[in-house]
Image (cartoon, rainbow, N blue to C red):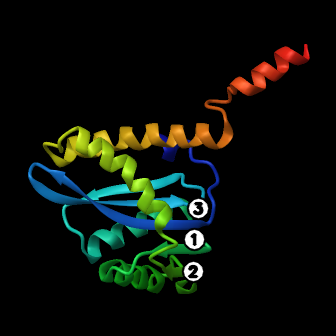
Amino acid sequence: MLWRRHKQSTSQSWRVDETYIKINGSWNYLYRAIDNQGLTLDFSLRKQRDYLAAYHFLKRLLKAYGRPSCLVTDQYGATLKAIKQVAKDGLIDLKAHQCSKYRNNLIEQDHRFIKRHHVQSEGFQNIRTATSTLAGVEVIHAMRKETRRNGSLFGFSVITELKQILAA
């Protein structure tokens, strides 16, 4: 994944959630994690929405980015059980976890971009192509968020260039 290869130091406050994606007529589950600035940390597409899917996603996320100071999730039972297990494994401090319907609004709003693309494409045919397509969508969305946040993309800012021209 592009953002994993070029990941920057992220905020240590994360939001984790899952959403539904239809693939070949059946519902699949997209687990996503973002930091408090809205930048995507990771995602995983799973056939089941259960404890094991949540556990494997959290474990991969924690190994890639380390311990967060704050981890916000919804109150879904499988996710809560997975968080207790990764805490038992020593990967996270249980005090860092917060269940909040409202503090998770940032990631709920972030799902809209994925859902909009999913509706426009009328679903996916198989999980492999869905994963590849969603990876591309996440990269483009990450570039859009980075451009909006910094006013630049790949180190180029139109405003900075204009200021330099006017100063000369």
Dot placed on the residue nearer the N-terminal end, 3 or 2: 3
Q: Pointer 2 and pointer 1: residues touching (CB < 8 Å)?
A: yes
Three-letter code, disc 1: Arg
Dot placed on the residue nearer the N-terminal end, 1 or 3: 3
Q: Position of residue 50 (x, y in %)?
A: 24, 74
Callout 3 secondary element: loop
Callout 1 secondary element: loop
In the orientation shown, which residue stands out farthest toward the right? 168
Image position of 67 with respect to 27: above or below:
below
Three-letter code, disc 3: Asn
Can you identify the residue that label 2 sits on? Answer: 96
Can you identify the residue that label 3 sits on? Answer: 36
Callout 2 secondary element: helix
Query: Real-space Cα distance between discs 2 and 1?
Result: 9 Å
Q: Which circle, 1 or 3, is nearer the viewer?
A: 3
Res. 67 mark = 1
